[in-house]
Amino acid sequence: MSAPSAADPSHSRYTESPVPVDILGLDREALEGLFAELGERPFRARQLLQWLHRRATSDFQAMTDLSKGLRRELAERVHFTEPGVRSEQVSADGTRKWLLGLEDGQAVETVFIPEADRGTLCISSQAGCPLDCKFCATGYSGFRRNLGAAEIVAQVRHAHREVGDRLTNIVFMGMGEPLLNYEPVRRAINLLLDDCAYGLSRRRVTVSTVGIVPRIHQLGRETPVNLAISLHGVTNAVRDRIVPINRSYPLERLLQACRDYPLPRGRRITFEYVMLDRVNDSPEEARGLAELLHGIPAKVNLIPFNPFPEAEFERSPSEVIDRFRDILLERGLVAVTRTPRGEDIAAACGQLQGNGDRAAAAEGRA
Ligand code: SAH
């Protein structure tokens, strides 16, 4: 991957960089910078964005409204990430999971979840994850590296080619912690929102985070899309244990960042809460959760725990989950229990490992 400084317009980094720029990860501002260096007019950026993203063209020669000279120059100077599809799996419920191979041999998983009224693409921001949340298979698989903006956007580009306009929503809920890879994620979001690229409204893009507090503030200032918080505990004692990053960013600071966050109009912050048998699922904790979220425009997603071999937890029984949800509802909160999607292809929350092996094994069992 290339050009980690591509968001900094203050010095020449497109034409002098020893590594060619990865063009798929450049947002409009960065592309305008590139064209300025090539002596081209800024509106070329819009044309190129349409070719690369909306029309998913990979061949510069096909971009017939750019001059021949410019096409040649682009083909020579810039680099192009086109991850290969290592595998595709389709669940009985219609969920599709792709394992995309990157140039250095790493791989990332991307999941498309069709529903009646929308199609959500769940994308990865890192290969593996540096956090070690105790109930998440990605954490167990370890951290390999950050993805570049191009590698993040390439997942969307691939899915858009496959499913077209059925893709309506994007969630950063695949592998990795998006707010620990902030700058590439921010540039990828710019492309998702850009009319010439994917043209999504910011109400249809959601960043999910375990709670990297300073970056939540920064996201709110710079690109305020929807926010989802992986909460999972209502006391610091429980959260310290199952989401260890809580020791750095405890609940009080996290909830304050949520209160301060400038949500898109009419939106609520989603709080994700994985239901772990006898760990965080008591009625008392449900009441605690309602108290904690008081005054925040919130929606609670209760996620039945999805097991994986190394995990030391079990899923809460469904009556316990129902009781927990009812306590939240009685207190006026919006709360739903999420139906696990794509379980049969290990595409459900917390099951992505980026190696495809377990997925293949699961398919063998099915
Ligand atoms: N790191 C970010 C993005 C990943 S989102 C975050 O934590 O928000 C993945 C979601 O699935 C998170 O809410 C995570 O807590 C949840 N999850 C992880 N492992 C799970 C499991 N085994 N069962 C159910 N949900 C899980």
Image (spheres, grey):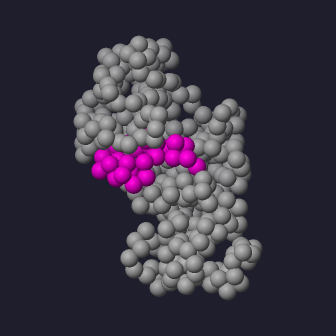
Position of 334 with respect to 93 (left or right) is left
- Residue occupying the point 30% across, 46% down: 213
Give above or below for 289 relative to 253: above
For the image, the number of numbered tags is 0
Give above or below for 361 relative to 155: above
- Residue occupying the point 42% across, 35% down: 269
Position of 213 with respect to 319 (left or right) is left
Give above or below for 270 relative to 182: above
Which span is picked out in magenta?
200-228
Where residue 208 sits, quadrant-wise, is top left
Image spot of residue 304 (x, y percent): 49, 27
Where residue 76 sits, quadrant-wise, is bottom right
Where residue 72 sits, quadrant-wise, is bottom right
The answer to whether residue 27 is magenta is no
- Residue occupying the point 65% across, 83% down: 70
Image spot of residue 276 (x, y percent): 41, 27
Q: Quadrant of the C terminus?
A: top right
Position of 148 with respect to 291 (left or right) is right
The answer to whether residue 223 is magenta is yes
- Residue occupying the point 25% across, 33% down: 236
- Mark yes or no: residue 19 visible: no
Q: Nearer the viewer, residue 212 or 110?
A: 212
- Mark yes or no: residue 63 visible: yes
Image spot of residue 7 (x, y percent): 43, 68
Position of 51 with respect to 29 (left or right) is right
